[in-house]
Image (spheres, rainbow, N blue to C red):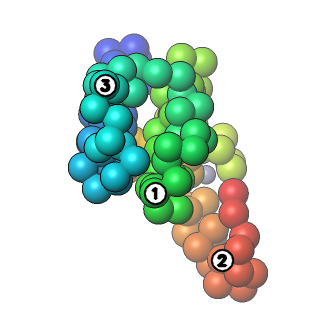
Amino acid sequence: MKSTQTAKFKQNLLDNRRELIEDLMITNENFSNLDHVKVGDLVDQASNFYQKELLIGLSTSEKETLSAIDKALEKINNEMFGQCEACGDTIDEKRLEAIPYTPLCVECKKNNNSNKVRNEGYKV
Ligand SMILES: [Zn+2]
């Protein structure tokens, strides 16, 4: 993928992450008490930030999204962005525009979902 394209996705990912954290700060009392911490600081902090106890209030799906966003950002740095984690194919750009942090191409996502039905708890 061209660096001009990844730059666009990187911006989308950073925007997504900021929105997620901002929502969290609005809804989570632990965060609203931390008035000395600015959203920007949190966003700029280490990517492992979602693992911290402050995020206890985060729902599982929000945690997963945040984790997926961080992974995707890492992939951009490693020039691996846009590759399906399961089959290694290039993920369709339209799919990335809809969900820039998706780790799977459409086909693998489909397979993943059907696996989930057969074997609950299965994750890629
Ligand atoms: Zn795939």
**For mark 1, what is the residue?**
57
Nearest to N terminus: mark 2 or mark 3: 3
CA separation, marks 2 and 3?
43 Å
77 up-or-down from 114: above or below? above
Instruction: Give the residue displayed 31% in from the left and 25% down from the top.
Output: 36
**For mark 3, what is the residue?**
36
**For mark 2, what is the residue?**
116
Pair 2/3: label in front: 3
Circles 2 and 3 in contact, beta carbons < 8 Å: no
Circles 1 and 3 in contact, beta carbons < 8 Å: no
Q: Amino acid at mark 3?
A: His
Position of residue 86 measured from the top left corner of the image (x, y, whole percent): 68, 50
Asked whether 38 or 119 is in front, the reply is: 38
| Disc 1 residue: CB within 8 Å of ligand 1 | no
Asked whether 117 or 71 is in front, the reply is: 71
Q: Amino acid at mark 1?
A: Gly
Circles 2 and 1 in contact, beta carbons < 8 Å: no
Position of residue 124 measured from the top left corner of the image (x, y, whole percent): 69, 57
CA separation, marks 1 and 3?
19 Å
Nearest to N terminus: mark 2 or mark 1: 1
Position of residue 54 measured from the top left corner of the image (x, y, whole percent): 50, 43
- The answer to whether residue 16 is visible is no
Q: Amino acid at mark 2?
A: Lys
Instruction: Give the residue displayed 60% in from the left and 18% down from the top.
Output: 78
Look at the numbered disc 1 and give the secondary structure of its residue.
Answer: helix
